[in-house]
Image (cartoon, rainbow, N blue to C red):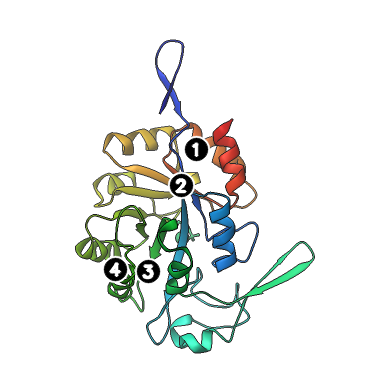
Amino acid sequence: TLYASAAGRPEAVLTDLEVIAHRGANNFFNEHTLTAYEIASEADADSIEIDLRMTKDHELIALHDTTLDRTTTGAGVPEEFTLNEIKQFDTVAVFGQKTYKEPVPTLEEIVTAFKQEEHYYIETRLVDGETKMEEPLINLLQENDLLDPKYVSFQSFSKESLKKLQEFAPEIRSTLLYGTDKFDLEDGLEADADVIGIESRNVTKCVVDTLHQQGKEVHVFFTDERTQLVEQQRVMMYGVDGIFTDDIDFTKQVLKE
Ligand code: G3P
Ligand code: CA
């Protein structure tokens, strides 16, 4: 929805913004856990973001980093552990004075918990440089009656992965992500993706307008915790279409104001 100025010229697009729960409820609980997704769901996020990794026995789990080190009691790369072994570890994080622990969830556990009550915004990655997670992902979504644009969107930094997903399920919305130093507007304009996902430092009014003119939506993520909230307000004024937020309540409050 456009807000019109006195002269009738649209000034900013502040509504219809997709509030995406970045890694669950990143500011409030261990990222990528069932509890974090539950908090996001209760805060009424429009979609919950899930970063996928694959275990040695080809199970899909929610985990952001390339290793288990930062977010869990384990160490090493998840591809070298079976699911059973990963379940021996816990995610671990400190909030206030308290340390919280909770298992690493599988994608199956997440969709079993939330069924068709959530929109899952799933990020795929190459596994050992190859497109190994796309087919099992599609199968799992199909088995759970979730392979529908109402329930799922895909995102990836890998064009190869997105292409494979589009071959399996062309109807599902796809987002091509660009790392902060990798964003190239010309490339984004030509990309075979519905949405371009960029870091806030790459977002200018001109970038947003140009991508919109080409029919692309713009979703924004943030890599600097200290500036995230100020940056959210800035990019919202440019009419971006989605925000990967670590603080759902804050983002919704800004939208209301
Ligand atoms: O997927 C969008 C955003 O989450 C990208 O950043 O590193 O948190 O996955 P990252
Ligand atoms: Ca992500």
Dot placed on the residue nearer the N-terminal end, 1 or 2: 2
Element type where label 3 sits in the image = loop
The residue identified by callout 4 is 142
Count residues near mark 2 (Cα–Cα under 10 Å), then give few for <14, some for 14-19, many for 20+. Answer: many
Q: Is mark 3 within 8 Å of ligand 1?
A: no
Residue 185 vertical placement versus 2 (above, below) = below
How far apart marks 2 and 3 lie (CA) works out to: 19 Å
Residue 222 percent coordinates (x, y): 53, 51
Question: Callout 1 environment at 10 Å: few (<14), some (14 to 19), or many (20+)?
Answer: many
Is residue 217 placed above or below 142 in the rendered structure? above
Please identify the quarter of the rendering in which residue 172 is found.
bottom left
> Residue visible at 62% across and 52% down?
225
Say which residue appears at 45% left-offset and 39% top-offset. Answer: 17
Mark 3 or mark 4, which is nearer to you?
4
Q: How busy is the neighbourhood of tag 3: few (under 14 within 10 Å), some, or many (20 plus)?
A: many
SS state under label 1: helix
Q: Is residue 150 left or right of residue 253?
A: left
